[in-house]
């Protein structure tokens, strides 16, 4: 009985925003640093990196997000048709669900990890996904996709964005890094994938038959993000990187409000703590 109570309490600890409750709440787009802008919703991140040669968009939110993201790009004075690449953090519907429509609107090439690209192209959810039993079995298939390897650099004119595999939350997880400059200063920019140890149904991070390496890969991903050269962090769910607290300081500090050299380490520390709680809950249920 004691173990059951502990497991129940641990499992009840908040690990992610309430499922879709406010993910698509409206959010005005804003500058982050240099040529990088936030174009996502209140609960789902999307970032635009701009250049004279065209633009790169990271993530497409949920299926309901696409219209807002396209509108946000226009509000900033850019054209959705100038987006040449759409990069994906991971293949869950809340970060990839809007990509099919955004690709249709822009004609962009969609880039994701090898596993993520397969899911986007086929629309079929992987049975190894830790949240498989609560995910839609299929999503809209995405046209014009291409897989990138860990460490690949996506180049577009002066832009160079590096892919870093960070699986564990999802099998196709990828974080992205680049540099942006303004006022004579250059910042190391990071779009960090979700690192939350969230599961559904019988999936266990301590012993999964469908994704046996889930725990090891998530631990490695946490270490990867902690080691990033990191000035400005945007996480796949914006509250995970304290984005709204930083935005509140922008009127006073300018875009320097988003700079925090400890941001990636703090994000990784929180993920490590959540994984520990998850493993403790699984152990208590044995």
Image (cartoon, grey):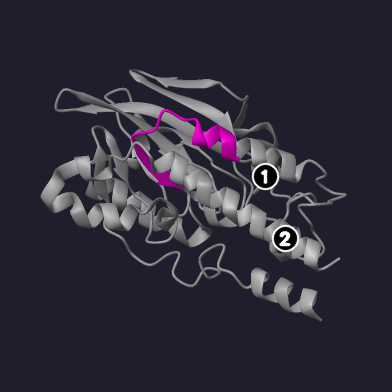
Q: Which residue is mark 1?
A: 168
How packed is label 2: few (under 14 Cα within 10 Å), some, or many (20 or more)? some
Q: Is 183 located above or below residue 138 in the figure?
A: above
Q: Nearer the viewer, residue 244 or 73?
A: 244
Which callout, 1 or 2, points at the residue further toward the start of the chain? 1
Residue extending farthest left: 252
Q: Which mark is residue 280?
A: 2
User: Image point 56% across, 30% down: which residue?
Assistant: 164
User: Image point 44% across, 40% down: which residue?
Assistant: 264
Q: Nearer the viewer, residue 96 or 121?
A: 96
The picture quadrant where one finds residue 48 is: top left
Q: Position of residue 84 (x, y in %)?
A: 42, 30
Q: Nearer the viewer, residue 258 or 25?
A: 258
How packed is label 1: few (under 14 Cα within 10 Å), some, or many (20 or more)? many
Answer yes or no: is residue 147 visible: yes
Q: Nearer the viewer, residue 252 or 112?
A: 252
Which is in the foreground here, disc 1 or disc 2?
2
Q: Position of residue 123 (x, y in %)?
A: 69, 49
Q: How many marks?
A: 2
Q: Position of residue 141 (x, y in %)?
A: 64, 47
Q: For residue 230: magenta? A: yes
Answer yes or no: is residue 116 visible: no
Magenta-colored span: 222-235
Q: Position of residue 235 (x, y in %)?
A: 45, 47
């Amino acid at each position: 009985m004691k173990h059951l109570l502990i497991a129940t309490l641990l499992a009840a600890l908040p690990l992610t925003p309430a499922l879709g409750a406010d993910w698509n709440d409206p959010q005005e787009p804003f500058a982050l640093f240099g040529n990088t802008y936030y174009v996502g919703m209140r609960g789902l991140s999307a970032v635009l990196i701009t250049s004279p040669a065209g633009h790169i968009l990271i993530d497409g939110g949920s299926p309901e997000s696409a219209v807002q993201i396209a509108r946000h790009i226009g509000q900033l004075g850019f054209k959705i048709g100038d987006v040449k690449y759409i990069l994906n953090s991971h293949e869950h519907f809340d970060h990839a669900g809007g990509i099919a429509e955004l690709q249709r609107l822009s004609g962009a090439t969609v880039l994701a990890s090898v596993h993520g690209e397969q899911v986007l192209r086929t629309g079929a959810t992987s049975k190894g996904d830790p949240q498989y039993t609560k995910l839609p079995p299929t999503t809209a298939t995405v046209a014009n996709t291409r897989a990138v390897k860990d460490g690949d650099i996506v180049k577009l004119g002066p832009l160079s964005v590096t892919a870093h595999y960070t699986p564990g939350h999802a099998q196709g997880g990828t974080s992205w890094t680049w540099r942006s400059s303004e006022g004579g200063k250059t910042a190391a920019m990071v779009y960090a994938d979700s690192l939350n140890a969230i599961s559904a149904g019988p999936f266990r991070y301590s012993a999964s038959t469908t994704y046996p390496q889930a725990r090891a890969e998530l631990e490695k991903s946490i270490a990867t993000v902690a080691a990033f050269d990191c000035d400005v962090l945007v996480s796949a769910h914006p509250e995970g990187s304290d984005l709204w607290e930083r935005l509140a300081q922008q009127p006073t500090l300018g875009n320097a409000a988003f700079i925090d050299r400890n941001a990636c380490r703090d994000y990784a520390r929180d993920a490590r703590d959540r994984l520990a709680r998850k493993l403790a809950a699984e152990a208590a249920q044995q």
